[in-house]
């Protein structure tokens, strides 16, 4: 499996709760290879990785998979609602920014800034 496939697999197994960046995955793969826990080979211009015997032993002895920990206790319904709301807001803002007049853009920016302030005030009211 190559690095990008691993990123996708982790995101899928964690239900989207954890999607590591290439900047964290590739150095980790290099470290694991340096330690003899994985081996790599090039195939079709891609570097494929697999566990070595030592790597399999370490993996079998280790704790739960990190994606299991990352997804434990996640309210998936709420997470979906949050994503939908955030993406909807960004889509609306983007549309105003691309097609709106200067005045409309300024109003849209003011709405976003006001929303951010109101969100922080929610936290301030709870304490």
Image: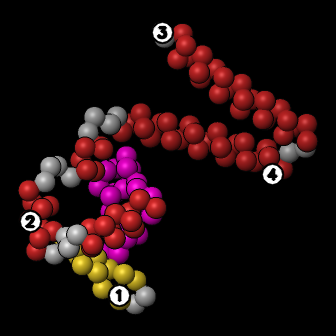
The quarter in which the N terminus is drawn is bottom left
Give the side of residue 40 with respect to residue 111, left or right. Answer: left
Label at residue 115: none
Q: Which residues are magenta?
A: 1-22
8 and 29: which is toward the camera: 29
Label at residue 42: 1
Of tags 1 and 4, which is closer to the observer? Answer: 1
Gap between marks 1 and 4 measured at Cα: 43 Å
Of tags 2 and 3, which is closer to the observer? Answer: 2
- Residue linked to disc 3: 127
Of tags 4 and 2, which is closer to the observer? Answer: 2
Residue 63: x %, y % from top left: 14, 49
Please give the name of the residue rendered at 25% of the width and 50% of the height, measured from the top-left corner. Answer: 66
Q: Secondary structure at mark 3?
A: loop
Mark 4: few/some/many CA within 10 Å (<14, 14-19, 20+): few
Label 2 close to label 1 by CB (< 8 Å)? no
Indicate whether 2 appears above or below 95.
Answer: below
Q: Secondary structure at mark 4?
A: helix
Residue 29, located in which quarter of the rendered image? Answer: bottom left
Label at residue 57: 2
Q: Is residue 65 magenta?
A: no
Residue 33: x %, y % from top left: 27, 73
Gap between marks 2 and 3 measured at Cα: 48 Å
- Residue linked to disc 4: 98
Gap between marks 4 and 2 measured at Cα: 54 Å
Please give the name of the residue rendered at 90% of the width and 43% of the height, measured from the top-left corner. Answer: 101
Mark 1: few/some/many CA within 10 Å (<14, 14-19, 20+): few
């Amino acid at each position: 499996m190559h690095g990008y496939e691993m990123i996708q697999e982790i995101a899928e197994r964690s239900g989207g709760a954890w999607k590591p960046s290439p900047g964290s995955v590739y150095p980790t793969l290099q470290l694991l290879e340096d330690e003899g826990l994985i081996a790599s080979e090039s195939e079709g211009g891609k570097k494929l990785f697999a566990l070595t015997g030592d790597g399999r032993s370490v993996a079998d002895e280790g704790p739960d998979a990190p994606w299991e920990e990352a997804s434990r206790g996640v309210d998936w319904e709420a997470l979906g609602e949050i994503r939908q709301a955030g993406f909807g807001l960004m889509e609306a803002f983007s549309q105003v920014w691309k097609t709106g007049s200067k005045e409309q853009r300024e109003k849209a920016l003011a709405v976003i800034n006001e929303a951010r302030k109101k969100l922080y005030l929610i936290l301030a009211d709870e304490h």
